[in-house]
Image (cartoon, rainbow, N blue to C red):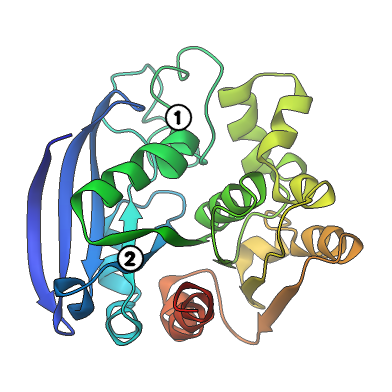
Amino acid sequence: MALTQVSSNKCCDGYQKVFEHDSSELKCKMKFAIYLPPKAESSKCPVLYWLSGLTCTEQNFITKAASQQAASEHGIIIVAPDTSPRGCNIEGEDESWDFGTGAGFYVNATQEPWKTNYRMYSYVTEELPRLINSNFPADPEKMSISGHSMGGHGALICALKNPGKYKSVSAFAPICNPIQCAWGQKAFSGYLGPDKSTWELYDATVLAESYSGPELDILIDQGRDDQFLSSSQLLPDNLIAACSKKKIPVVFRLQQGYDHSYYFIFSFINDHIKHHAKYLNA
């Protein structure tokens, strides 16, 4: 599959690059960002996939989170895809900020008119890793996943639905129980239709309740002053309860004074990369 380099910038002795390609899953052109640490020049490196939140593109994380320094130090490639298909000319795709463009929710849509293009789950778990492993010095046996908000939801479901595929998982302010919150209900109704049993396949809290894979060590940071926490969009308590029932280890840190923004991610990203490095470099 042909990749076109969109940009390349030297950063922390490695390179922050952006590529474009034709996606077979999403039937459109897609961009992804990739940070190649200096170690990648001489050997294969583990890969951390980062999933961004509502309204984001591949740019938000690479320009605001300052992940490159820790990735350089630990020898980890970081891949940050876009958050939805783009420019598919689907009626209504640009009507709201929390559904359609920039809001793929990391599901495989089953409903018209979304089901042809909105297959972000398969894109993130299958197509993108294949692309990365065949075009970059990535160690295909060593991948982890992280994300923010809608992307935190994405990271959690990818890890819980694919036992053993990811060495570790972490999230910032994830949407933990989408079938119980307004964002999730809107997205899942549109992409997956009225049958709520299909929604459960993409809900981290429900998936945790039936998880039976190798031990998964979850790190979650949540800002205490996050407006979406107080408006019951994130519901971390539900996920923590499900994990404790199944004895899935979760480190949940409620961070005093922090909100939902990238200032919050910037403040704790080094801890998350260190968390993943423990497993990826083991």
Picture coordinates of residue 231, whole percent (x, y): 70, 58
**Which image quarter: residue 130?**
top left
Question: In the image, what residue type sits under mark 1?
Answer: Arg
Mark 1: few/some/many CA within 10 Å (<14, 14-19, 20+): many
Closer to the camera in the image, 129 or 206? 129
Q: Nearer the viewer, residue 113 or 250?
A: 250
Q: Is residue 47 left or right of residue 256?
A: left
Residue 140: in sight, yes or no? Answer: yes
Position in image of residue 157 (x %, y %): 62, 48
Tell me where residue 270 appears, x and y as whole percent.
44, 85
- Mark 2 Cα within 10 Å, few/some/many (few <14, many 20+)? many
The residue positioned 45% from the left and 29% from the top of the image is 119
Closer to the N terminus: mark 2 or mark 1? Answer: 2
Residue at numbered disc 2: 78
16 or 179: nearer the eye?
16
Asked whether residue 96 is in view, the answer is no
Give the amino acid at mark 2: Ile
Q: Is residue 203 above or below residue 229?
A: above
x and y percentages locating residue 141 in the rendered image = 44, 58
Residue at horizontal 34 percent and vertical 73 percent from the top = 76
Viewport quadrant of the N terminus = top left
The residue where tag 1 is placed is 119
Q: Is residue 152 left or right of residue 184?
A: left
Q: Could you tell me which secondary element the residue under label 2 belongs to? A: strand
Q: Is residue 45 above or below residue 87?
A: below
How many marks do you count on the picture?
2
Question: Circle 1 — which element?
Answer: loop
Extreme residue in the right direction? 245
Q: Residue at x 70, y 35 (%)?
A: 201
